[in-house]
Image: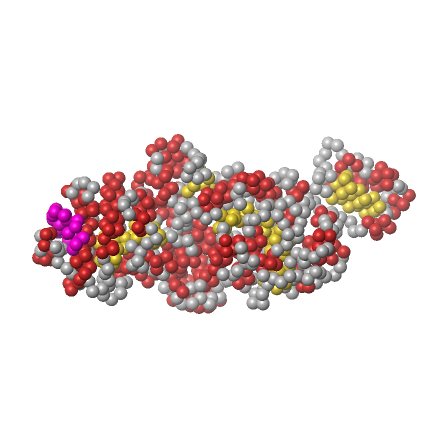
Amino acid sequence: MTGETTTSRSVRQQIEENARSAGFTDPQIYVAEDGFGSYLVRVVHESMNSLNDSGRRKLLLKGVANIVSTAELITPGEEEWYGPPFSEATGQMPLWHEVLSRPLSVDELTFATDLDQDIELPAIVTFYSLRGGVGRTTALAAAARILSERGRRLLCVDMDLEAPGLATVLGCPEPREDQGVLPLLLALERGDQVDIRDHVLRVNEGEELYCLPAGQLSSDYADRLRLLDPEIWYREAGNPLHQLLQLAKESALEPDLILLDSRTGISPVAAPLLFDISDLAVICFYPHPQAERGTELLVKALMSAKSRRTTSDTPLTPEPRFIVSPVPPGPSADTVLTRAVTWIDRWIGDAQNRRPEEYDPLRADEITHAVSYSPDTAFRDKVSNGVATREAYGSVADWLEQLLPQTYALSASSRNRKHDVLEQLDFSTGTAEQQASLLDDFVHTRVAQQALDARSPLVIGRKGTGKTAVFRWLMERYRENENPVIVFSPHAFRNSYKWTLGSEALAIIERDFPGESAWSTFWPCYTALAAYFALPPEERADPPARFEVTKESLDAVYDELSTLDVVKHMMSRPMASLLGSRWLRDINSSATNRHMLLFDGLDTGFGNNAESRKRRTRAVTGLMTFLTESEAHLSALSFKVMLRVDIWQQLRFENKSHLYGRSVQLMWRDQNDYFKTVLKQAVRSEIYREMLADARVGPSVDDWRDDEVRRAWNVLVGERMKGGKTTFTRNWVWNRLADGQGDHGPRSLSQLFHEAVQWERREEARSSYDRSIMRPRALVPSLDKVSVEALSALQEEFPELDGVVEALRNLRRTPIEPGEIEAVDRTAAERVDLALEVGLLEIYEGTQDDVRRYRVPDLYRLALGLTRRGQA
């Protein structure tokens, strides 16, 4: 066969020709690859009776003897004790020595979650790790507990036969000696008739969660384990592993998911689990350099595998997911996760080119989940089903659920009212200052309640995270007799309070009172004046006589200019700072109720050029000094300062540490809390509220449980991004609205849904959609407009970033290599740290101390017109 490409077909043709030449009529011929570049051959014919082994080989293997590794040249009688023939479908066997040396596939890469049609259940997921100690079994058990609570039926199978432990982690009793995976597989190898239910343990009576343990660790367990040979499974007609899964599928258990806990390392059983039977492979690892090469080889082998699952003649590849565990607490956590995501992005880079355009690209950050180290979890005997478990492993459960059919579609009555509900839905797109319904839409999350608490004088947060929403709530929803004192406010509210000063007046203050002490004098005087004007007459105290400010002169104040005159007069008096502080304490003593001194708008209230920002830093430093020195003397008055986090980080003042533990940072770290901000706007629609009642969702958004938030979300915009089983819409939105610091702004979420409603109204007129009020596809074009708005708002706030923005546009791709920005614009390169600080960029690879690469988050990437560029 020299000079031509050898295949199973060509080997068969040569043997058939040899058999005809020898006078063999209708021989039975079986040919299969052995995984090493050679072939397995069996020929069965009665004419073999007159030939010895050497003669048989000489006649039948002419031209192919050098590429046949195993030849079974036998008579029908001999076949009885040879046993069944190997399977000709063996092809590329899912064994380590074969898959790791296999060249990278050039076939299209299709996953089960890419398909519009549902795959036949059960879906099969393997949890695997090259090394131990990375929480593989815990992750499987936790995801199983979460999914069973969601009403899913699961069978967890302990395939870690050398070191079983899944049953213990799930809290199951000890199996019987004849119960479990090992005795079941051995029985199937013998051809015994078995009932899988005899080997299964039920985890608890309240849920459809079952465990198939490895077996009882008795005296002969190790001896029986030696009898298993997974390689033989793929050389014979009956494959015990396949039979086990078929038994589970056909049993009364009817699992939606089968979760397989694989042995670590290059164990014989692990390869078939990963490369043959899995729809999804969850790879657990810690990004230590020792794990990098081995895990990379594993991932590339996985991307070239074809599972047993074939749908509509489309061969499917096991889809990868990654758990990074255990991530250490503290500042090193981000470094660990960044390193892992960078590796994964490189590992899947080659596979991206094989993905059809209509499929969502693999994103390393979306297929990776970090699990922080938890002593409580590490030392528990079994996985609990509490809040901590759901928070740590909820995303893993979501990955698995993507393989299953969607759980919700609009009822017939809801579909008939879709046009009307689309007309009713209205999402606010303006800033917190502009939103007329903001107070009704305010979501009382845990962090929001902390921000409202008078015991926390400082509320910090990034732009758009809700500082002004907190300010407005305190300003407009105060309790009876608890008048707020508006000392400093955003520009939109200044006309409502005659004493508020704008940027020009503040510039005049610093011009007329030069020196470091100007602001330490200004704030006591100005705050006391604001409190005097804001409080009821019976709670006021007259200014100290040394101020030489009469009641008549105060009554004459009616606008910014007259306020500025009074403040300048007060500041010009000897010991003005002490007099202002004394006046504020007198007001405090006169007050019969508690009042809050509110400060907001400090970020833009001083102007927006370079000199104004320097003035702001000096002024806010003076305010913080005044706050820390004064609050201990005030019992009825409390401070509440809203401040952007980057401004707070730049401040240097004595006793700054006194505010540690007494400040609240507004951060949206909980998906469900974040989504409540838009769902609370949606429930203004009467029809939507009625739809939610049909979906068993309660009336009070603030009191919704996590499952109610998910159902309300699914009614509004659907569960998944396609008709099939791709990314959950909530995860898609969460990832794409995050800035480079991982923060989320409610305003961007409202804008996204405002645009999506407009898009759906137009699309519904052309083609109806009945799974949700808005089809998930509406989010995709809407995100483009949100990105434009987000970038515009960022540039308005930070005009010094204009050079960075233009440099990024010229680069046209992300991630960005070191030096690329500088090559475009040297001045822009000097603003990279600011771009990182405000979330325009994120560190893609490296740390603060070594060579870094940068990435632009999707929130800004789309507006910049950047395409994604992976690393090969």
Residue 858 lies, with reference to residue 254, above or below; the image says: above
Q: Is residue 682 left or right of residue 359?
A: left
Residue 294 versus residue 457: which sits nearer the camera?
A: 457
Residue 620, image x and y in percent?
A: 25, 47
Q: Where the N terminus falls, by quadrant?
A: top right
> Over which residues does the magenta segment extend?
559-583
Q: Is residue 351 above or below residue 630?
A: above
Figure disc tally: 0
Furthest residue in direction right, as rendered: 50
Of residue 568 and residue 463, the one placed in the foreground of this image is: 568
Q: Is residue 455 visible?
A: yes
Q: Residue placed at 33% from the left, 40% from the top?
A: 801
Q: Quadrant of residue 441?
A: bottom left
Q: Does residue 334 appear to the left or right of 383 in the view shown?
A: left
Residue drawn at 69 percent across, 55 percent down: 182
- Say whether residue 263 is magenta: no
Q: Residue at x 52, y 43 (%)?
A: 287
Q: Is residue 797 visible?
A: no
Visual colour scheme = secondary structure
Query: In the rendering, at what x and y percent does residue 4 appear?
Result: 72, 34
Residue 232: x %, y % from top left: 73, 48
Between residue 648 and residue 590, name the one nearer to us: 590
Report the residue at 27% width, 55% height from top.
640
Image spot of residue 551 (x, y percent): 10, 57
Task: In the rendered view, tell whether residue 708 sits above or below residue 559.
Answer: below
Front position in the image: 715 or 517: 517
Q: Main secondary structure of the magenta part?
A: helix
Q: Quadrant of residue 60?
A: top right
